Amino acid sequence: MKSFKNFIGGDWVPPIGGEYFENRNPADLSDTVGRFPLSGAADVDRAVESARRGFEVWRNTPAPARGDVLRKLGDIMVKRKDEIADLMTREMGKPLAETRGDVQEGIDTAYYAASEGRRLFGHTVPSELRNKWAMSFRRPIGVAGIITPFNFPMAIPTWKMFPALLCGNACIFKPAEDVPHTGHVLVEMMLEAGLPPEVIQLVHGLGESAGAAIVNHPLIPVISFTGSTETGRMVGEICGRMHKRLSLEMGGKNAMLVFDDANLDLALDGVLWGAFGTTGQRCTATSRLILQDGIHDELLSRLIDRVRDLKLGDGRKDGTDVGPLISQNSLEKVERYIDIGQQENADLLCGGKRPTGKGLENGYFFEPTIFARVRAGMRLEQEEIFGPVLSVLRFRAADEAFAINNDVKYGLSSSVYTQDVNVAMRAMNELDTGITYINAPTIGAEAHLPFGGVKQTGNGHREGGWEVYEFYSETKVGYLDFSGSLQRAQIDNYLGTPD
């Protein structure tokens, strides 16, 4: 079995404590990817010491030159795309078509970030005083702690690290313990692209040890975390107490609203992809399907037929539609919600159990599941499951549908299928989510637009697009007075309009 190392201090090194964990293929638990370090606070301390040295080098590298490194990294990812997709599918299960898309998001993010090296804009504005200039510009912050989830092993780390690096920060990266191999390969490519070695530190381990050490470290002023709302709440409490800059991207309970005038073929394809892509393990997954009375029965009947035809299996094999869940804990959580749904008297129409087919017995597989006759307020309808479970609700008019959509604690993504431009525009304005799609599913964010949600989905910052560069940099204001005399701003000598 291959043993992997952390990357700390410009070198591949074992964990200080000497302990490792095994990473297994969730589609076949007999297939071990490798052993990875169980790092702790001492490893993080070493990483911080090195990252601070790297920061001093990197911050003084011109931003366009930093962008050149990321552009080269994107080129490397293009050449290795299929290889990376294969190892990602082996590590976390989703089909190759999805992991290729995951890599492509990383490529897109690299090229977008590279171009931002020439667009870290500030402002030059008039001063209220004569012979004086006033301006702002962007500066890096320091060492950024990057803590990422399993479901997008390449895309999400690049969403976070590429903007952080472009802005001139150093990064300490802890990938989810379920996908350490992808994180290892990403750091290898960063180094190949020419990133100075001490600018990136890779610290493997568990969230409660390595992750907690990063969040609690006094010399890491910036934290970016994607994960559960419960963990995000704890991270937020610590960062608030320590005055750290924090970006939280957390849960979702996303709904697709289908109106009577919708293109039902399009809506059917959309909900299949939105609900069961990545085995439902997306923060943007379609977890609720809200159908208007007139098309409810027809669309639901057609959906059940399509869901029963979905093929479960190893994502590296041709014909696989749905891969495994990521872990035993995830499998057991989904099973608990099946029980909850039945206790709440929702109708279990298909799925709801582990499959028994050949080749599925050694993996964390679960049948795509549909509950109908779900009512607003049920736990099944309110709580994030993070698995292949879809709740179907019924509505009469737009006001009712919008109210159902908004009556959850999350606010990440929403989707509306309609031919009525008035309904579509109302939805864009009234649905209380960070993202709304019209005639498309709740998943499908693009790298050059901001990504994030409201309420308990996040804390107001956005990944992706142009806004993330503001998160990873500080605004510095400069005044240049060439009057040759003391000019006292904010004293009662404002020149104003001449008499």
Image (cartoon, helix red, strand yellow):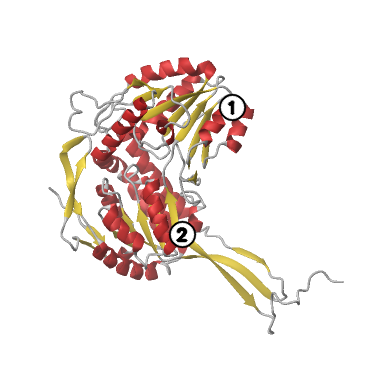
Pinpoint residue 243: horizontal percent, then vertical percent: 45, 64
Pinpoint residue 63: horizontal percent, then vertical percent: 46, 62
Q: Is there any visible trace of residue 327 in the rendered image?
A: no
Residue underneath mark 2: 472
Q: Considering only order in the chain, which callout, 2 or 1, is on the residue closer to the N terminus?
A: 1
From the viewer's perspective, tell me whether residue 375 is left or right of residue 49: right
Residue underneath mark 1: 398
Instruction: Name the kind of residue labelled 1 in the image.
Output: Ala
Does dot 1 land on a helix, a strand or a loop? helix
Separation of marks 1 and 2 at Cα, in angstroms: 40 Å
Instruction: Name the kind of residue labelled 2 in the image.
Output: Tyr
Q: Nearer the viewer, residue 41 or 376?
A: 376
Q: Residue at x 43, y 18 (%)?
A: 300
Q: Is there any visible trace of residue 310 in the rendered image?
A: yes
From the viewer's perspective, tell me whether residue 252 is left or right of residue 259: left
Q: Residue at x 69, y 74 (%)?
A: 490
